[in-house]
Amino acid sequence: MKIQLPEKVAFIIKTIQDAGYEAYAVGGCVRDSILGRTPDDWDITTSAKPEQIKALFKRTVDTGLKHGTVTVLLERQGFEVTTYRIDGKYEDSRHPSQVIFTSDLLEDLKRRDFTINAMAYNEQTGLVDAFDGLKDLKEGVIRCVGNPRERFEEDALRIMRAVRFAAQLGYRIEKETEEAIRQLAPTLERISAERIQVELVKLLVSPYPDYLGMAWELGITAVILPEFDAAMGCEQKNRHHRYTVGEHTLRALAAAAPDRVLRLTMLLHDLGKPQALTFDKEGVAHFYGHEEISADIARRILRRLKFDNDTVYKVTKLVLYHDYGCDVDPDRRTVRRAIHKIGEDIFPLLPAVRRADLAAQSDYMRKEKEARLAAWEHCYEEILRLQECVSLRDLAVTGRDLIQAGMQPGRELGETLQRMLEAVLEDPARNTKEYLLGMIK
């Protein structure tokens, strides 16, 4: 099998080989090349020691000398070059206590997580595939290199990576690998929230975000997202739904575009339903106030997983308002008030949330719900086209205008501006300086 190496990668490998050492492209870049994808980056593994690599290239960065990694810079582009190594004992389910350099490529490949990531390539030798990674790629299988328990005991994050790769590629997890995940999923408690966040987001924005259901079946979410487990067991006994809250969530994720904020919103939008669940006399389920409960839960989860403030703000607000106006036939007045209440930054994101939510519900009144959503979108487009005022920023008068008209700075001035905005939200034609200043005479 021939892989087309980028010119700079081929140059680095040849330079190392010409000096008498071995060098190969390795890992994900080899996997992606075989799959016909463009690798995000190219990693190189070599028999040469870090100091020998530094002597071969003009510009290098000591990225991780302790672990054998040097970054070679070619025209401002960096390529990580790492010495073949054998990892010592893992004492924290994440990092080896020591690294032993070796001259044997196979020893280096043995320590890698999955067979599809344990292939190496150079133009001289061709593909080195000691663990049948190519076969697993062709068959769509995620399989650990060697003993899966050992691989997961070395690095518990590999448990999440297995499901993440399955979701990115649409693959199944091999039986022994799967069983080891079930047994060792609790060890994810030792992994930092930041690393859990990275893997969770990669899973969510993958082509198969509903593989989160696989994470649930394998006991992963019980550790990293117990709120989702509660949702999986929560029945929705009313005519608008046909799935449990968790199953609805998985289907909503699959229906949403692969945007980070949107997929996080769909993951979290209904997690308050188990707490809000009530039944009427006919045994029909209701979830009054679940939006507020879900927003609080979403905020706690996002903080727990160390998401940035902007993501926390956007997602929690979208969760809070994901059902807003869904049972109201809108006009522009209604939508103007909704934009003002929800925010000009958040409101445009809501239709995508509503559409994914609808796709995961029952067929009951589906056409009516979709028509109502389309009407909301049409009104919003008209408001934009007509440049109608929806916030103080767009008001025809400012606080300075009111002061010039004789008002004193303070609470009364702010309340007056709000009263003016209310009048304009009711009727955009009132948004003139003459009309608004007339309100204070």
Image (cartoon, rainbow, N blue to C red):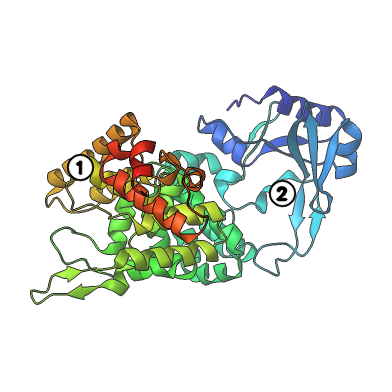
The amino acid sitting under disc 2 is: Asp
Foreground residue among 87 and 131: 87
Q: Nearer the viewer, residue 246 or 386?
A: 386
Element under disc 1 = loop
**Label for residue 108?**
2
Locate the N terminus by quadrant. top right
Name the element at disc 2. helix
Numbered circles on residues, count? 2
| 10 Å crowding of disc 2: few (<14), some (14-19), many (20+) | many
Is 301 situated above or below 257? below
Q: Nearer the viewer, mark 1 or mark 2?
A: 1
> Which residue does the image show at 51% across and 52% down from the upper left?
311
**Badge 1 density bin: few <14, some 14–19, many ≥20, Cα 10 Å:** few
The residue that appears at 65% across and 26% down in the rendered structure is: 5
The label shown at residue 362 is: none
Compared to residue 174, the image places residue 60 above or below, namely above
Between 342 and 269, the one nearer to me in the picture: 342
- Name the outermost residue toward the bottom: 281
Q: Which residue is drawn at 44% across and 59% down?
A: 412
Residue corresponding to mark 1: 331
Q: Which amino acid does label 1 sit on?
A: Asp
Inspect this view and state whether residue 140 appears.
Answer: no
Q: Which of marks 1 and 2 is nearer the N terminus?
A: 2
Q: Tell me: 100 left or right of 288.
A: right
Q: Is 43 displayed left or right of 193 in the figure?
A: right
Residue at 73% over, 66% down: 89
How far is mark 1 from mark 2, CA to CA? 65 Å
Quarter of the figure with residue 154:
bottom right
Question: In this rendering, does residue 224 appear at all?
Answer: yes
Q: Contact, CB < 8 Å: mark 1 with mark 2?
A: no
Q: Position of residue 18 (x, y in %)?
A: 85, 27
Q: Where is residue 165 in the image (x, y as percent from the top left)?
A: 49, 48
